[in-house]
Image (tube, rainbow, N blue to C red):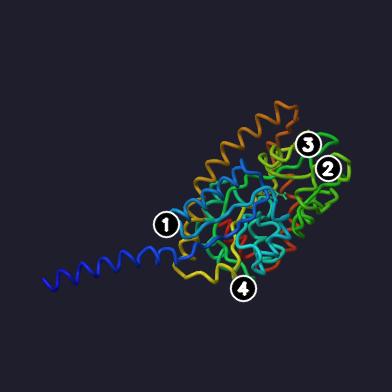
Amino acid sequence: MKKASFIIIAILIAAVLMPAQVFAQKTIVLRLAETHPQDYPTTRGDYEFARLVKERSGGRIVIEVYPGSQLGQEKAVIEQVQFGAIDLTRVSISPVAAFVPRLNAFQMPYLYRDEAHMWKVLKGDIGKELLASLEPFGFIGLGWFESGARNFYNSKRPIRTPADLKGLKIRVRESELMMGLVSAFGAVPTPMPFGEVYSALQTGVVDGAENNWPSYFSTSHYEVAKYITLDEHTRVPEIIIGSKISLGRLSPADQELIRQAAFDAIDFQRAEWAKYEKISIDKTVAAGSQVVEIADKSAWQALMAPLYAKQSKEIQALVERIRAVK
Ligand code: GTR
């Protein structure tokens, strides 16, 4: 009898204390910066990542996604992630390579045989190694997203051979490698933030830019640069990075939960990408974009040899390993 009443009292005390404990467990809110608008496939990938984190943490960890460059342009956002003012961001590896040079290995021109090859690299040992190598620079590399192949487009003329690019002012990202690439094609690289490109094309500050189909469409660049050439000079993966300072405050188990969720959001994002890429092609072509296909890219590739030769030994070794992935 005595034992039974003790158990009942214990249960009652637990019932009273339980909600207090639950409420005492504070919700962790992390802000994620995204340059693209809400309906862009990469942003959809961010939302999926946030959904998985919330679900798996039982609502304890909430990732708030800020699309449309609300928290700033990519370079400024990366700096803020580095010193912990922004917790997470999805960016292209191009601007991150200015902070972590070895990432350049992943955006060398004509590096991957195709999309499948790139994903084998990203999801395999080399991809994991590169994500881990971000840590000494103040970032936690969480996962990769698809970003298609990049092509040149401009407002002046159809580009059929690299010689047609000669002298054109082409907007590039704030990336030394991209400047070298555009110069090697004989064009004039003009670095500027993504958000300024539309008006730069419109006012003639630049003649052209380069990007994948979804960005060409979603930014409306096609309205002011209708000649697009499918030279597919790079495949530049997107990356989700976290701040070492802010994620470092979380328990190792929570850090692992976030890492796994980012990785598990990849396939969803890739499927969204494929759908949106098709829509982008259809819509821009219907609006009057003139597409030049390049069946044989060997003349384009040949011009990139000096750029490869200029890279550090570390990058050259990585490039060899990437090429060896079958
Ligand atoms: C897009 C990429 C963005 C941004 C942009 C650019 O393809 O998703 O993160 O880097 O290109 O050219 O600035």
Q: Name the residue tied to disc 3.
A: 160
Element type at mark 3: loop
Q: Name the residue tied to disc 1.
A: 58
Q: Residues within 10 Å of mark 4 (few under 14, many from 20)?
A: few
Q: Residues within 10 Å of mark 2 (few under 14, many from 20)?
A: few
The amino acid pointed to by label 3 is Arg
Q: Is the CB atom of the residue marked by disc 2 within 8 angstroms of ligand 1's nearest atom?
A: no
Q: Name the residue tied to disc 2.
A: 199
Q: Name the residue tied to disc 4.
A: 136
> Mark 1 and 2 residues: CB-CB less than 8 Å, in contact?
no
The amino acid pointed to by label 2 is Ser
> Mark 3 and 1 residues: CB-CB less than 8 Å, in contact?
no
Q: CA distance from mark 3 to mark 1?
A: 54 Å
Horizontal relation, residue 7 to residue 152: left or right: left
> Mark 3 and 2 residues: CB-CB less than 8 Å, in contact?
no
Q: CA distance from mark 3 to mark 4?
A: 43 Å
Element type at mark 4: helix
> Mark 1 and 4 residues: CB-CB less than 8 Å, in contact?
no
In front: mark 1 or mark 4? 1
Q: Which mark is residue 43?
A: none
Above or below residue 190? Residue 136 is below
